[in-house]
Amino acid sequence: MPNYKTKRKLSRILPFGIIWVLLGWLFLFIEHADGTDNSQTDAINLNFPVFLFATFAVFLVGILVGYIELSFLNRRFHQRPFYQKILFKLIFYLMLFSLVMLILYPIAASIELDTSVFSKTVWTKYFSFLKSMVHFSTMVQLSASLFLSLIYAEISDNLGHGVLLNFFTGKYHNPIEEFRIFLFTDMKDSTSIAEKLGTKKYFLFLRDYYNAVEDAIIKFGGEVYQYIGDEIVITWEYQMGVKNYNCLHTFFEMKDALATKSSFFLESYGYAPSFKGGMHFGEVTTGEIGALKKEIVFTGDILNTTARIQAACNPYKTDFLISMELLDRLKLEDKMFSITKIGNVALKGKNESLILAKVERNLKHPN
């Protein structure tokens, strides 16, 4: 099974490298735009091999920053105000940059001077560089690259990486029609839990609930379209959702994730969350909308229908209902899932009935 989580992480890290390369080229252009010779004895003269090395090195530094940011620092400072994130991360990265410069500058100097990296001439040039205005300028440029990288990371976290990428590429600037699979989930007994926990503690409960199921959604190529109170609306492009039964595996993996963390929720809040879900597919129109605040939205009857399928879980005493139309498209293996066909169901607010089925995972069957 493809590792969608790894692919997603790589797609989030790559822009860091691109940002750093583009800013590096911009600073280089500014420094040489007037056509005068700005070289100093402690600066490395630019030639094509040095340019290629510098571009590759800056790209790798950007990738390194992205990896550290998304794997470690972002979670470490997740709940701190933005200015504190910037301050603490700036101190960390300045120390990191000093170490990187200690490695990269002597290599670049050895390329320019056509000598060994351990040559006394190389290290004399390096120590002269540390005391120079060139060093100060370099640190300012690195700080600017870092600042923009952190801004990108914050926007990506708040909008969602996929949404940000679609805004940049203009994929949905003009509305398009596409087939998508939707899963609507709803937490059980959420009203009762909210009343007993109180507003603030219930908010923390919801946040931990969302975090607990996040990896399961990413793992099988899903995207969170909306958080609506205690409801989560998850979507897949059609081919992604049907491939390897990704859409079905997501639901059951989310269940597993909550079961694994049930003791944490019981100790922290006195309640272990659970949910029910409804799944369907169909054509939607997707596009950017909004004047004061732009969003990428899906419109179509499929969303209303899927919400109604989810609402039908209670009358049929099940946690998961899916349209037979989608099940037929999935062509399930009998041994992997157990299917109980319900038949035609009149959905609330809908004129036409829909054939639904219960789906349960066969725990004895290896995934």
Image: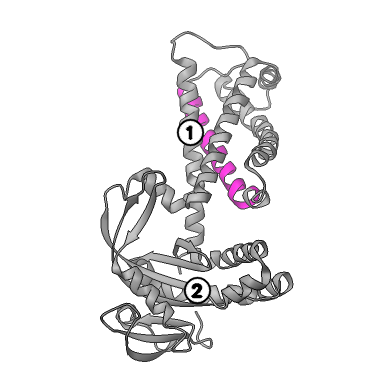
| Left-right relation of 323 to 136 | left
Q: Is residue 103 visible?
A: yes
The x and y percentages for residue 8 are 48, 56
Q: Based on the displayed image, in which of its 4 quarters is residue 106 positioned?
A: top right
Q: Which secondary structure lies at badge 1?
A: helix
Q: Which secondary structure lies at badge 2?
A: strand
* First in residue order: circle 2 vs circle 1: 1
Magenta span main SS: helix
The three-letter code of the residue at mark 2 reads Asp
The three-letter code of the residue at mark 1 reads Val
| Left-right relation of 194 to 330 | right
Residue 353 forms part of the magenta stretch? no
Q: Residue furthest top?
A: 36
Vertical comparison of 185 with 161: above or below:
below
Q: Residue at x 54, y 45 (%)?
A: 153
Check disc 2 and report the residue beneath it. 186
The x and y percentages for residue 262 are 66, 75
Q: Residues within 10 Å of mark 1 (few under 14, many from 20)?
A: many
Q: Residue at x 58, y 43 (%)?
A: 64
Q: Based on the displayed image, in which of its 4 quarters is residue 83 positioned?
A: top right
Check disc 1 and report the residue beneath it. 21
Labels 2 & 1 near each other (Cβ < 8 A): no
The x and y percentages for residue 314 are 47, 85
- How many angstroms separate mark 2 from mark 1 (CA)? 44 Å
Q: Residue at x 70, y 71 (%)?
A: 269
Q: For the magenta stretch, what is the residue range?
A: 48-73
Q: Residues within 10 Å of mark 2 (few under 14, many from 20)?
A: many
Vertical comparison of 357 with 241: above or below:
below
- Of residues 169 and 110, which is closer to you in this image? 169
Q: Residue at x 63, y 74 (%)?
A: 193
Vertical comparison of 116 with 302: above or below:
above
Residue 63 forms part of the magenta stretch? yes
